[in-house]
């Protein structure tokens, strides 16, 4: 049922923007049987998206409430259905949030939610921000939709649309730069060869202003997604601690924000060679490597894990609670306090990174069955 609301919202958006096809218009008209209000929307192009969301929220709220009450009854009688109950609740919340409508109070407690929101207005999602350190030690803060240029000798760096671009840099003058993305941030950089790198919160990349010689080499800490420009004559190498990831033209995600000492690389396009100590493996698209104690393990990859954060989502697929909380606290720049024993149970689900911390807590409560409260800038898990 949630997919119907999502589809109606998608079709209405295309209708209001004038990009809807004849087939899609017919599909939207057929939804009138279930949602009579659509006829009014179709007759009035001045209708606001907020009004559409409000009514769809009412429809969805009724369906979700019925599912929730029914599942609770089953859970009381059948303990083994507890995991299923958690996923149904989480999926309903995610569907509501993806649609832009709010059913959160029905899962986090209608009386509790306003109090939590009032006390924690200063907890907001992360944003586009970074600190650039030039070779002379000068630091420049980036973010806030800046549009400017930075000069350093023959180097010319352009900043526009939350991207630091080295495409126009003089190839005869090379400097080593660092770009640091703090907790609560993300940023994008285009290197001199055309390679684009997305940096997640609490991450850093060190790189030359121009690539010289027979290779292209950078070093990272944290998490970064690389879309490498093709240049068969100069392999692209990423230093990650004691390991190296080598590519010619490909796309992959590297994450060191895991258990201590672990490095995970997920390949989404092309081929890469991953090396550590005297070991190396070559993997194809759809595979991943995990380095732990200088050992390399290869396994099938979940592409969503590599792409979700770059596209603006938290993705819980197969992650335990501590891993999920590590991502969330880095993005919202908050702490977490565990007052409940944390198991290694794996969870499914996800949520947009632009949502409020209250919405995130609602989803997590549904997924885990735990009580998650916000105390100033600390998530308390009971």
Image (cartoon, rainbow, N blue to C red):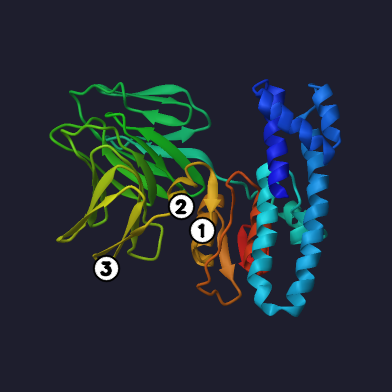
Percent of width and height locating residue 373: 68, 64
Could you tell me which residue is drawn at 65 percent across and 44 percent down? 98
Residue beneath disc 3: 293
Q: Quadrant of residue 325?
A: bottom right
Q: Which mark is residue 215?
A: none
Tally of numbered discs: 3
**Foreground label between 3 and 2:** 2
Mark 3 surroundings within 10 Å by alpha-carbon count, few (fewer than 14), some (14 through 19), many (20 or more): few
Mark 2 surroundings within 10 Å by alpha-carbon count, few (fewer than 14), some (14 through 19), many (20 or more): some
Element under disc 1: loop
Q: Quadrant of residue 24?
A: top right
The foreground one among 7 and 176 is 7
Residue contact between numbered discs 1 and 2, judged by CB atoms under 8 Å? yes
Element under disc 2: helix
The foreground one among 160 and 320 is 320
87 displayed left or right of 102: left
Mark 1–mark 3 distance (CA, rounded to whole Å)? 25 Å
Percent of width and height locating residue 189: 38, 34
Could you tell me which residue is drawn at 29 percent across and 32 percent down? 229
Which of the two discs, 1 and 2, labels the residue nearer the N terminus?
2
Mark 3–mark 2 distance (CA, rounded to whole Å)? 23 Å
Residue beneath disc 1: 317
Residue beneath disc 2: 305
Mark 1–mark 2 distance (CA, rounded to whole Å)? 7 Å
């Amino acid at each position: 049922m949630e997919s119907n609301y999502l589809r109606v919202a998608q079709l209405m958006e295309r209708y209001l923007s004038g990009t809807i096809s004849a087939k899609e218009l017919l599909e939207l008209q057929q939804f009138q049987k279930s949602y009579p209000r659509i006829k009014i929307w179709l007759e009035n192009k001045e209708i606001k998206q907020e009004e559409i969301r409000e009514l769809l929220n009412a429809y969805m709220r009724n369906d979700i409430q019925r599912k929730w009450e029914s599942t609770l009854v089953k859970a009381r009688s059948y303990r083994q259905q507890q995991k299923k109950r958690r996923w149904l609740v989480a999926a309903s919340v995610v569907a509501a949030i993806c649609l832009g409508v709010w059913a959160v109070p029905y899962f986090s407690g209608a009386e509790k939610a306003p109090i939590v929101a009032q006390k924690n207005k200063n907890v907001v999602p992360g944003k586009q921000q970074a600190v650039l350190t030039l070779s002379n030690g000068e630091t420049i803060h980036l973010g806030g939709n800046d549009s400017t240029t930075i000069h350093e000798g023959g180097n010319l760096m352009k900043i526009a649309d939350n991207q630091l671009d080295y495409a126009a840099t003089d190839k005869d003058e090379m400097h080593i730069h660092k770009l640091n993305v703090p907790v609560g941030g993300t940023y994008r950089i285009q290197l001199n060869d055309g390679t684009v790198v997305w940096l997640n919160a609490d991450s850093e990349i060190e790189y030359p202003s121009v690539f010289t010689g027979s290779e292209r080499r950078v070093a990272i800490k944290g998490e970064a997604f690389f879309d490498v420009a093709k240049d068969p004559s100069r392999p692209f190498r990423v230093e990650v601690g004691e390991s190296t990831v080598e590519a010619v033209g490909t796309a992959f995600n590297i994450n060191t924000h895991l258990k201590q000492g672990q490095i995970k690389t997920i390949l989404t396009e092309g081929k890469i060679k991953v090396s550590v100590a005297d070991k190396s493996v070559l993997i194809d698209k759809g595979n991943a490597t995990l380095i732990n104690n200088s050992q390399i393990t290869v396994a099938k990859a979940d592409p969503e894990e590599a792409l979700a954060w770059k596209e603006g989502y938290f993705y819980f697929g197969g992650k335990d609670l501590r891993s999920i909380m590590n991502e969330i606290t880095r993005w919202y720049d908050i702490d977490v306090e565990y007052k409940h024993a944390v198991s290694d149970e794996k969870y499914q689900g996800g949520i947009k990174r632009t949502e409020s911390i209250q919405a995130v807590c609602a989803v997590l409560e549904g997924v885990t069955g735990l009580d998650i409260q916000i105390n100033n800038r600390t998530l308390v898990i009971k």
